[in-house]
């Protein structure tokens, strides 16, 4: 597993944003069972997180939870981390955009 961190013109990150980033690193580690790369790019309060690896697993329930679509999804011990991450995104009043394919997932926060 490789973690790549890029940033421009920042001296610190807000606590709420750091928590979101760390939770996405955990999500990336659990989604890339065959290894891969997590790339984080942070600039002026906006950040992108990208997971790249072969056979990336990001189940539909994960995407629904992250986007705040909680209808008919039971919160369990296997998805509580994702639910917590979504709560952090909501509290930070961020908009999340997800782009997903077999080998790549990108999360943009504005």
Image: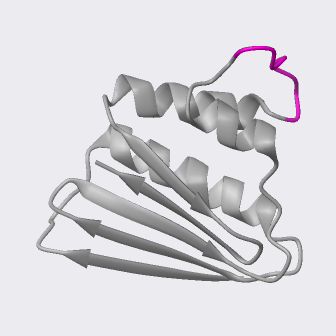
Q: How many marks?
A: 0
> Which quarter of the figure has residue 29?
bottom right
> Which quarter of the figure has residue 65?
top right
Chief secondary structure of the magenta portion: loop
Residue 92 horizontal/vertical position (percent): 33, 31
Where, quadrant-wise, is the N terminus in this rendering? bottom right
Relative to residue 85, is residue 9 drawn left or right?
left
Relative to residue 33, is residue 93 drawn left or right?
left
Q: Is residue 5 above or below residue 96?
A: below
> Which quarter of the figure has residue 82?
top right
Residue 75 horizontal/vertical position (percent): 81, 19
Q: What stretch is highlighted in magenta?
A: 71-78
Please name the residue shown 33% across and 36% down the image: 94
- Residue 74 part of the magenta segment: yes
Q: In this view, does 103 lie above or below 72?
A: below
Relative to residue 9, is residue 88 drawn left or right?
right
Please name the residue shown 57% across and 26% down the image: 68
Residue 28 horizontal/vertical position (percent): 68, 62
Please name the residue shown 71% across and 36% down the image: 81
Residue 102 horizontal/vertical position (percent): 77, 73
- Residue 16 part of the magenta segment: no
Please name the residue shown 77% across and 55% down the image: 58
Q: Is residue 21 above or below residue 66?
A: below
Relative to residue 85, is residue 109 drawn left or right?
left
């Amino acid at each position: 597993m490789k973690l790549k961190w890029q940033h421009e013109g920042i001296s610190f990150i807000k606590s709420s944003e750091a928590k979101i980033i760390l939770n996405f690193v955990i999500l990336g580690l659990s989604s890339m069972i065959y290894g891969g790369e997590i790339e984080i790019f942070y600039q002026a309060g906006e950040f992108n997180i990208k997971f790249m690896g072969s056979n990336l697993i990001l189940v539909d329930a994960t995407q629904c939870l992250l986007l705040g679509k909680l209808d008919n999804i039971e919160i369990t011990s296997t998805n509580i981390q994702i639910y917590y991450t979504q709560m952090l995104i909501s509290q930070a009043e961020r908009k999340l955009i997800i782009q997903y394919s077999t080998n790549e997932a990108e999360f943009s926060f504005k």
